[in-house]
Amino acid sequence: WGPLEETTVDDLKDQFETNVYGPFRLILGVLPGMRNRGAGVIVNVSSVAGRVAAPINGLYSASKWALEALSETLKYEISHFGIRVHLIEPGGVETPFGDNRRLVGAGAGEESPYSELISQWEQAGQRLTPDGAAQPDAVAGVIVDAVENGNKFRYPATPDAEFVLTARKAMTDEQFEEAMRQQLGITW
């Protein structure tokens, strides 16, 4: 994660390798068998960041937006064969996910022209995450429900994701950006 200007094409490739190419390879591996059986369920785990971008998180969001597009395209192409596609969109989940992230570019150690924005983003994460993160079991329950009873494509999987996605639908782009800035404490 980091300001887009300070990231590299290799950083973007890493995000896409994990969040787009990995799921795509799995889909290609299972799809022929599902098509031959005339049944199957494909569940892709995206993120609220796959529908709502935020500063400092652009590479992750770009990869999740791509997964959303692949999933939606796939749904159109394979529903004819009796195969369902579901997209799970969690927000904050209490996992070690954040432990694995790394700041890329100049913000990773050198002085960055984006230092203030990076600091505001980190403070927002500390402020919003501790009590707001959902438990992994809750997200797993949403996945199980989608597989067993799935009658829709998208499943916002945490209360914060539901809130953000509902707000996004109800606001203009400008209103939503202002609301996000206020909620996150971004004065940049």
Image (cartoon, rainbow, N blue to C red):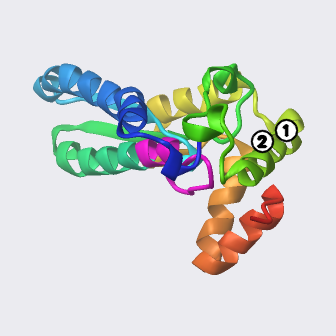
Query: Can you name the residue that lies furthest to the front here?
Result: 111
Task: Name the quarter where the N terminus is drawn.
Answer: top right
- Badge 2 crowding class, 10 Å Cα cut-off, few under 14, some 14 to 19, many 20 or more, is few
Q: Which residue was labeled with disc 1?
A: 126
Going 14% across and 29% down the picture, which residue do you hit? 35
Front tag of 2 and 1 = 2
Q: CB under 8 Å between callouts 2 and 1?
A: yes
Task: Kindly state the secondary structure of the residue where label 2 is placed.
Answer: helix
- Name the disc covering residue 122, or none: 2
Question: Viewed as shown, does residue 102 lie left or right of 14?
Answer: right
Q: Residue at left 72%, top 48%? A: 115
When asked about the image quadrant of residue 43, the answer is top left
- Which is nearer the eye, 186 or 89? 186
Give the magenta-colored segment's residue range. Answer: 50-64
Q: Residue at x 48, y 42 (%)?
A: 7
**Could one spot residue 186 in this view of the protein?**
yes
Q: Calculate the distance from the C-alpha at mark 2 to the C-alpha at mark 1.
A: 6 Å
Check disc 1 and give the amino acid type.
Gln
Identified at 28% across, 22% down, the residue is 26
Residue 57 placed where, x, y %? 58, 46
Seen in the image, is 163 located left or right of residue 47? right
Magenta run includes residue 181: no
Residue 151 shows in this picture: no
